[in-house]
Image: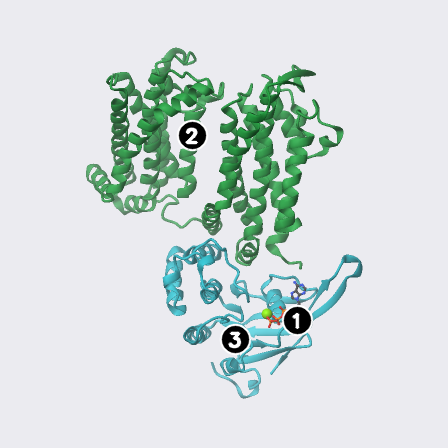
Chain colours: A cyan, B green
């Protein structure tokens, strides 16, 4: 991807890049307490953010800043109070805490979600095989989620988000619980996807990750500020 | 070609020797162990009950269920391969014929096993009538198994269906006392008359044997047709089914697995009706109790034995309770991941449908077991109405369970569902407490269905049109509410 001199601050907004996600003026408050004494806590106060194909974008901020809330709104798992989201239909979402059926096995999850994404049988088997290998958990294919370690759950959680090779990947701290080796494999995997034209929005805490992102948004005071 | 194919398939089957052994051992065990027990059981139920006759029927039953199940799997597991084969130029006719021949060969083995077992048990030798009738049993179930195998994609659903048909056939058939006119429509009704050599008296011109033959032709005909339709080259066979069908199928399979791996559900669904109903019938005295019933258009007070009334009312109490718990558990258990699933092209209503099928299967099982336990000591005046009313209760309370989870949460939901069925069916609608339900009881969801149930239990004719209508209105309203509630759960757009 060629960066033109004018676009130094937004290296991937070159000509021909497609916008896969565009959010404007996202506002969200959580209401707490009894209905009579309900108080509102604004978490997001007008977030603007956009992603184009072929970039890895970081979303950072302290605990409780609203990163997960924002991502849920972006993928459509939560309704914003105000604002608009435009996004490709071909997306995958990896929630911060693994969301899995306790009594189903790894390959049963992949089979179900594969069918849900509309993958053909051959697409399913090749993608499943690759993800087992890339994330190194093939030996747990036949294990029920309730018997999996936390790290392996995270791997399955991530595999479900990526299996259909979507144009947009929204990953909420996907490598929490990964060992060092898997962490490296994860970044290999994401950069391969990026080079193939996919766009990734990744929530992260680690300063060490910063060099891996093409761009970074800081979420402070309910707004996303591009670094 | 046909010969080559069918022998190859048989060899394939025989490659796992366990399959072959089971095919012989199962009927042996079934006939030797069960004949006596079943005969006693049938006696209690007021069936034909002559031990020799029932013994002969057990051979037929064993042969039938094995023919059905092995026929089902023989077709179901090879459906795709068969289509490809037909496509590749072998032709649908050859493939279908070979499939049928190898299935019949398997059925022959299990029929032989059943007959040997019967021969050993009776030691008075087998009559030609029994041998012939056992073959009829087996052929009919080959037809059923193959047809189901061709038409139903899910292995679990299909094999369950075959087994369910067989259970109804056996336990509600003439040897066990019958279900009135309805049992005549079960496939083994006339063959059972043949094997027990007791005239059904309803066979008409053709006679029991003639009708049995006709059923064999019909069953095999449907099987061939179904197999041909789904094997024919250029049919929907080689194309992948449309995405929405594939995802519903995948989700249904997964949902049944989840249920299957939920031991508490099995303990409740199977154990509770057995314990609950038999216990409460046993402890109820046989003293008279007044009950308001509708007969020939008029409501009258009738005096009935209390243990019978208790036996009847325990079924909807148990069924309502279990159906609502199944609704609650199944929905709450997977709600969070269902939300995730609804971010894919899956529609919330499709997911609800999948969950509902599972809930209803569990409820149906609970209903069947409740009915079975009750039938040991109580025979309703009209089985179809009695069964139908209890299914209505199951449906109604299953939807209540679906609503309760998301509205009250898991724990709150359990409390509500411990109370509601008992207050509604166990108290308000219960004729043991009051000959007719109190006014407030008329506004509860179980009112109409329990009236219909009492009508089926104790009167010959159906006189509860208005209560039936009321029950259906409840069902529709609860169905709509549960749909709305579930949509909100699956979409989770509000927080
Ligand atoms: N369902 C909810 N109801 C009420 N408040 C909530 C809810 N979910 C989150 N919050 C609050 O909203 C704020 C933002 O939460 P969010 O999970 O988006 O933070 P985050 O940036 O992802 O934090 P972390 O780095 O810990 O994952 C927090 O103060 C949190 O307490
Ligand atoms: Mg978070």
Q: Distance from label 1 to label 2 (Cα)?
A: 61 Å
The residue singled out by tag 1 in the image is: A24
Q: Are the residues under badges 3 and 1 in a single subunit?
A: yes
Q: Secondary structure at mark 3?
A: loop
Q: Position of residue B344 (x, y in %)?
A: 52, 58
Image quadrant assignment for residue B47 = top left
Q: Secondary structure at mark 1?
A: strand
Q: Is residue A88 above or below residue B431?
A: below
Mark 3 crowd level (few <14, some 14–19, many ≥20, 10 Å Cα): some
Q: Give the total of numbered labels.
A: 3
Q: Secondary structure at mark 2?
A: helix
Q: Is A222 or B23 nearer to us in this picture?
A: B23
The residue singled out by tag 3 in the image is: A17
Q: Chain of mark 2?
A: B
Q: Position of residue A84 (x, y in %)?
A: 66, 66
Q: Chain of mark 3?
A: A
* Residue B306 visible from this viewpoint: yes
Q: Is residue B416 left or right of residue A107?
A: right
The residue singled out by tag 2 in the image is: B167
* Residue B139 visible from this viewpoint: no
Q: Is residue B54 left or right of residue B334?
A: left
Q: Distance from label 3 to label 2 (Cα)?
A: 63 Å
Q: Position of residue A28 (x, y in %)?
A: 69, 67
Q: Is B71 or B196 nearer to us in this picture?
A: B196
Q: Is B346 or B293 nearer to us in this picture?
A: B293
Label 3 close to label 2 by CB (< 8 Å): no
**First in residue order: circle 3 vs circle 1:** 3
Q: Distance from label 3 to label 1 (Cα)?
A: 19 Å
Label 3 close to label 1 by CB (< 8 Å): no
Image quadrant assignment for residue A26 = bottom right
């Amino acid at each position: 991807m060629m960066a033109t001199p004018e676009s130094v601050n937004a290296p991937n907004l070159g000509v021909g890049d497609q916008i896969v996600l565009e959010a404007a003026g996202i506002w969200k408050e959580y209401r707490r307490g009894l209905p009579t004494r309900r108080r509102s806590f604004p978490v997001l106060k007008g977030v603007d953010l956009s992603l184009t194909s072929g970039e890895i974008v970081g979303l950072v901020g302290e605990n409780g800043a609203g990163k997960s809330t924002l991502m849920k709104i972006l993928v459509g798992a939560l309704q914003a109070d105000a604002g608009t989201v435009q996004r490709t239909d071909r997306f995958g979402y990896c929630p911060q805490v693994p969301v899995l059926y306790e009594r189903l096995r790894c390959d049963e999850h992949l089979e179900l979600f594969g069918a849900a994404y509309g993958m053909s049988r051959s697409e399913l088997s090749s993608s499943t095989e690759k993800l087992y290998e890339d994330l190194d958990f093939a030996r747990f294919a036949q294990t029920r989620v309730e018997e999996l370690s936390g790290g392996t759950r995270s791997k399955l959680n991530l595999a479900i988000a990526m299996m259909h090779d979507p144009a947009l990947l929204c990953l909420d701290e996907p490598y929490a619980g990964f060992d060092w080796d898997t962490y490296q494999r994860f970044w290999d995997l994401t950069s391969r996807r990026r080079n193939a034209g996919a766009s990734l929005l990744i929530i992260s805490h680690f300063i060490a990750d910063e060099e891996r992102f093409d761009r970074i948004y800081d979420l402070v005071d309910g707004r996303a500020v591009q670094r | 070609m046909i010969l080559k194919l069918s022998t190859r398939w048989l060899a394939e089957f025989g490659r796992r020797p366990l399959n072959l052994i089971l095919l012989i051992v199962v009927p042996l065990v079934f006939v030797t162990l069960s004949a006596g027990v079943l005969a006693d059981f049938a006696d209690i139920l007021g069936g034909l009950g002559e031990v020799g006759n029932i013994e002969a029927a057990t051979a037929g039953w064993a042969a039938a269920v094995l023919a059905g199940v092995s026929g089902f799997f023989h077709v179901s597991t090879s459906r795709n391969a068969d289509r490809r084969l037909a496509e590749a130029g072998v032709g649908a006719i050859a493939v279908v014929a070979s499939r049928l021949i190898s299935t019949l060969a398997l059925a022959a083995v299990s029929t032989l096993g059943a007959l040997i077992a019967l021969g050993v048990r009776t030691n008075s030798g087998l009559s030609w009538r029994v041998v012939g009738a056992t073959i009829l049993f087996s052929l009919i179930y080959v037809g059923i198994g193959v047809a189901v195998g061709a038409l139903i994609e899910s292995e679990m659903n299909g094999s369950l269906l075959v087994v369910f048909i067989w259970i109804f056939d056996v336990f509600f058939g003439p040897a066990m006392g019958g279900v009135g006119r309805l049992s005549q429509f079960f496939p083994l009704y006339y063959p059972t008359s043949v094997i027990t050599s007791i005239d059904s008296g309803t066979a008409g011109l053709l006679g029991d044997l003639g009708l049995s033959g006709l059923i064999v032709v019909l069953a095999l005909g449907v099987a061939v047709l179904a197999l041909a339709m789904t094997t024919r080259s250029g049919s929907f066979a080689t194309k992948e089914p449309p995405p929405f069908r594939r995802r519903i199928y995948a989700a249904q399979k997964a949902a049944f697995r989840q249920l299957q791996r939920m031991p508490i559900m099995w303990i409740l669904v199977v154990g509770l009706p057995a314990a609950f109903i038999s216990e409460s019938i046993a402890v109820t005295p046989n003293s008279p109790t007044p009950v308001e019933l509708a007969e020939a258009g008029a409501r009258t007070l009738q005096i009935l034995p209390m243990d019978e009334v208790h036996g009847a009312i325990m079924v909807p109490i148990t069924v309502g309770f279990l159906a609502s718990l199944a609704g609650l558990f199944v929905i709450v258990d997977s709600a969070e991941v269902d939300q995730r699933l609804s971010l894919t092209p899956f529609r919330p209503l499709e997911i609800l449908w999948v969950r509902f099928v599972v809930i209803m299967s569990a409820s149906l099982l609970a209903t069947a077991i409740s009915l079975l336990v009750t039938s040991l000591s109580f025979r309703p005046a009209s089985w179809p109405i009695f069964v139908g009313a209890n299914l209505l209760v199951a449906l109604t309370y299953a939807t209540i369970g679906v609503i309760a989870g998301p509205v009250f949460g898991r724990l709150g939901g359990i409390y509500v569902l411990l109370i509601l069925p008992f207050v509604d069916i166990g108290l308000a609608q219960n004729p043991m407490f009051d000959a007719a339900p109190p006014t407030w009881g008329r506004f509860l969801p179980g009112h109409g269905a329990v009236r219909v149930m009492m009508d089926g239990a104790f009167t010959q004719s159906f006189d509860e049109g208005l209560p039936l209508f009321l029950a259906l209105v409840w069902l529709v309203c609860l169905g709509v509410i549960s749909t709305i509630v579930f949509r909100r759960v699956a979409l989770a757009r509000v927080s």
